[in-house]
Image (cartoon, grey):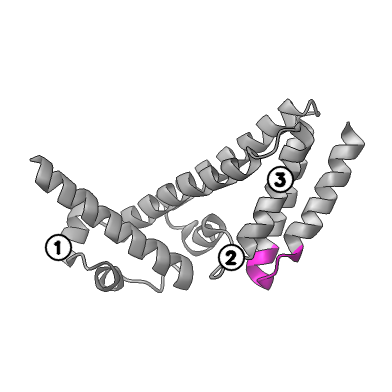
Amino acid sequence: MDSTAARRQALARDQALDAAEELFYGRGIQSVGMDDIRGASGVSLKRLYQLFPAKERLVEAYLERRDIRWRQRLAEHVDRHEEPGERILAVFDWLRRWFAEPGFRGCAWINAYGELGTTSPRVTAQVSAHKAAFKDYLRSLVANAGLPSSVADQLYLLAEGAMVTAGITRSTEPAEQAAEAARLLVEARR
């Protein structure tokens, strides 16, 4: 494949993924067909199926790309803080900001698992990888703060619970409540 064809293929892939992200996250995966992706992306069905031979592959790529962006945004926010305990609490501040974004519909991975987790090993693998990476990130923050490793598991449950609740209520309150619980936990374990 020459460089022009490779660039066209990369552009079509990005257009398809941009459309998939907007539609899958906004409407749900099962309610969106490949024809919807074609219409929103401007990529022909033939090209879509060349790039993603099955809708499941498109869902997998959408979750994988969203994971990279989500974790990068979280890390950039947390990295603005220097004190290790504040870095932990910054996770919950970032969640609050995320929950307040227009179009917030909850956690894309929890939503995807709810729709396809029992039928799609590829989706389950993406969800598991995302959640494991988030938990590992919390473990690194907890270790840098000199706290017992079990605190990371507790913070993880607070964050995940806030995500589920915020997805249902469309409110930032779950992040605020989880942040307060996290603050109390960190102070108690110091």
- Going by the numbered disc 3, the residue's amino acid type is Ala
Rendering quarter of residue 41 = bottom left
Dot 1 corresponds to which residue? 46
Dot label at residue 164: none
The CA span between labels 2 and 1 is 35 Å
Q: Look at the image and say whether residue 146 sits in the magenta stretch.
A: no
Please tell me whether residue 183 is drawn above or below residue 161 in the rendered image: above
Q: Is residue 167 visible?
A: yes
Looking at the rendering, the stretch of residues picked out in magenta corresponds to 165-173
Residue 82 placement: quadrant: top right
Pointer 3 local density, CA inside 10 Å: few below 14, some 14–19, many at least 20: many
What crowding class fits label 2: few (fewer than 14 Cα within 10 Å), some (14-19), or many (20 or more)?
Answer: few
Looking at the picture, how far across and down is residue 17, in whole percent?
A: 33, 57
User: Residue at coordinates 72% horizontally, 26% vertically from top-left?
Assistant: 144
Secondary structure of the residue carrying numbered label 2: loop
Q: Is residue 170 left or right of residue 53?
A: right
Name the residue nearer the viewer: 161 or 4.
4
Label for residue 101?
2
Which residue is located at x 76 percent, y 29 percent?
149
CA gap, disc 3 and disc 1: 45 Å
Give the label on residue 90, or none: 3
Badge 1 local density, few (<14 within 10 Å), some, or many (20+)?
Answer: few
Judged from the image, the secondary structure of the residue bearing numbered disc 1 is helix
Q: In the figure, 28 relative to 187: above or below?
A: below
For mark 3, give the secondary structure: helix
